[in-house]
Image (spheres, rainbow, N blue to C red):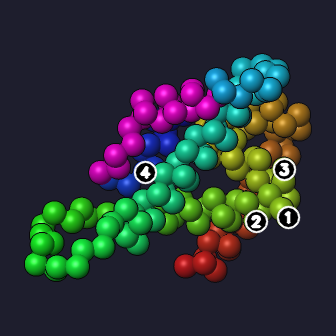
Amino acid sequence: MARRYMRRERAGNTLQTTALVHEAYVRLVDAKSVGWQDRLHFFAVSAQMMRRILVDAARARRSAKRGGQLQRVEDSSVVNLEQIPDIGTGRSAELIALDEALDALAKFDPRKARVVELRFFGGLSVAETADVLQISSQSVLRDWKMAKAWLMRELGRSS
C-alpha cells in the first residue's frame, strides 16, 4: 500500500516508502482501542492512517511554501537565493484538494467516501472492499462510480 501511495507523490518527495510504513506502524501501535476484526479491517485502518500521514505531510509542504519555516532577516544582503529550496506543491495541493473533497463527500454519503478511501488509498479490490463494508460487490462498483463522478465535479470546482 505504501509503495502505491508513494508512486502518486510528486517527484523529489522527501518522505520514503519505508518512512511512511514506519510512521503508520507507530500510529497503529498507539491505537490500543482498535478491536481488530480481521486482515481486511487492518488494511482498512492502515489505509486511513496512511491517508492522514500523506495529507499532513502535504499540508506541511504547503505551509513551508508560504514561509512557515522561515525566519525574518532584516539585512537582505545576507540571503543567498541559491540556498532557497525549490518546493514543488502541485501534488501536495492535489492531495489536499482530494482529501477535502473526500471529507465533503463523507458528510453527504459516508459509505461512498469509505469506498473511495479503501479502493484508492487502501488499494483494496472490489471484493475486499465489499467484505470490509459488508455490502455486495455491485454496490461497491456503483458507489465507486458515483463517488468518482462526484469527486471529479468537486475537484473541478476548486481548480
Mark 1 vs 4: CB contact within 8 A:
no
The stretch drawn in magenta includes residue 18: yes
Please give the range of residues in magenta: 12-28
- List the residue tagged with mark 2: 104
Q: Going 24% across and 62% down the picture, which residue do you hit?
A: 85
- Tell me: 50 left or right of 127: left
Q: Residues within 10 Å of mark 4 (few under 14, many from 20)?
A: some
**Extreme residue in the right direction:** 135
Indicate the secondary structure of the residue bearing disc 4.
loop
- Identify the residue at image location x=43%, y=33%: 19
Inter-mark Cα distance, 1 to 2:
7 Å
The residues tagged by marks 3 and 2 sit, at their Cα atoms, a distance apart of 12 Å
Q: Which residue is mark 4?
A: 9
Q: To which quarter of the image does residue 104 belong?
A: bottom right
Q: For the N terminus, which image quadrant?
A: top right
Q: Earlier in the sequence, mark 4 or mark 2?
A: 4
Q: Nearer the viewer, residue 96 or 83?
A: 83
Q: Position of residue 159 (x, y in %)?
A: 55, 79
Label 3: which secondary element:
helix
Majority secondary structure in the magenta region = helix
Residue 120 picture location, percent across and down: 62, 46
Under mark 3, the amino acid is Arg
Residue 38 vs 142, above or below: the answer is: above
Residue identifier under label 1? 108
SS at badge 2 = helix
Q: Amino acid at mark 2?
A: Ala
The nearer-to-camera label among 3 and 2 is: 2
Q: Is residue 7 visible?
A: yes
What residue is disc 3 on? Answer: 111
Q: The disc labelled 1 sits on which kind of residue?
A: Phe
C-alpha separation, residue under disc 1 versus residue under disc 3:
9 Å
